[in-house]
């Protein structure tokens, strides 16, 4: 019987902001989803929810140190925007997420896969369009869900990892990245032009339809 892998995905940075040099997509993979609900002692925040940008230094350190001791694998994509204002559409977001999911699915080829995104799009129609694109680019047995991090706190692990990578890439602070570096199975840097080219190639190969993400 194939094992069941849970992959939690979140981003740090935004596509449309031309002043943001990069956007990070982080995926945290585990065979035990329950282990990603970290002890309360690791999440001393006003809201009780751990997000990288609402947590103090000690909370970040404690949370990421605890995370680094778990049986997980981290996959990271650093997208260099190079001053571009990229529309935040389901297809553009799928284009960059498909890059990291390709690495994840290669790594877990013989597993049943649940991919859980911290909810990115508010409209259900946008989420459905995004899911359809992702499914067309994969051949494995996968399920996709989009969750509220308050209701499914395990997805906050991806937020914390993504924030750590963003701070490292932008030169703000690399101490948090160093804590989880040993758990990173794949760390890829691409620019938007490369990401679009890869996405279109994969989509053409899978569907025979040559469409391009929005500029």
Image: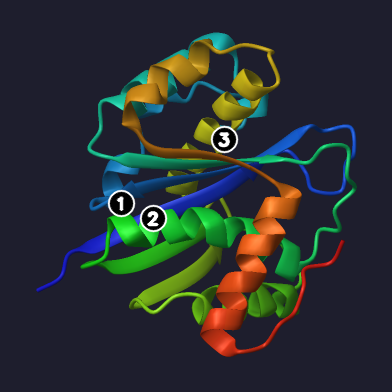
- Tell me the crowding category of disc 1: few under 14, some 14 to 19, or many 20 or more residues within 10 angstroms, Cα based: some
Of discs 3 and 1, which sits in the foreground?
3
Q: Residue at x 50, y 40 (%)?
A: 76
- Tell me the crowding category of disc 3: few under 14, some 14 to 19, or many 20 or more residues within 10 angstroms, Cα based: many
51 shown above or below 94: above
Alpha carbon distance from label 2 to label 1? 16 Å
Q: Which x, y percent locates residue 21?
A: 79, 32
Find the residue positioned furthest to the left.
1
Of discs 2 and 1, which sits in the foreground?
2
Q: Quadrant of the N terminus?
A: bottom left
Q: Residue at x 44, y 15 (%)?
A: 178
Of discs 3 and 2, which sits in the foreground?
2
**Label 2 sits on residue:** 104
Q: Quadrant of the C terminus?
A: bottom right
Foreground: 53 or 27?
Answer: 27
Tag of residue 162? 3
**Label 1 sits on residue:** 33
Q: Are the two marked residues, 3 and 2, in contact with CB atoms closer than 8 angstroms?
A: no
Q: Which x, y percent locates residue 159?
A: 56, 38
């Amino acid at each position: 019987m194939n094992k069941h892998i849970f992959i939690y995905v979140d981003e740090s940075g935004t596509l449309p902001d031309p002043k943001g040099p990069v956007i990070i997509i982080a995926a945290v993979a585990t065979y035990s989803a329950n282990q990603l609900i970290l002890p309360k002692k690791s999440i001393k925040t006003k809201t009780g929810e751990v997000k990288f940008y609402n947590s103090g230094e000690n909370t970040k350190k404690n949370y990421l140190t605890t995370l680094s001791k778990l049986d997980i694998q981290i996959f990271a994509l650093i997208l260099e925007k190079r001053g571009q204002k990229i529309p935040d559409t389901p297809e553009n977001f799928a284009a960059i997420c498909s890059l990291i999911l390709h690495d994840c699915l290669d790594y877990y080829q013989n597993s049943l896969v649940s991919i859980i995104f911290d909810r990115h799009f508010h409209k259900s129609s946008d989420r459905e369009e995004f899911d359809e694109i992702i499914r067309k680019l994969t051949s494995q047995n996968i399920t996709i869900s989009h969750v509220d991090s308050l209701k499914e706190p395990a997805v906050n692990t991806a937020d914390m990892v993504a924030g750590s990578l963003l701070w490292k890439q932008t030169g703000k602070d690399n101490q948090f990245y160093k804590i989880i570096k040993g758990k990173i199975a794949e760390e890829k840097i691409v620019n938007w032009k490369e990401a679009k080219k890869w996405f279109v190639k994969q989509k053409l190969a899978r569907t025979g339809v040559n469409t391009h993400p929005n500029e």
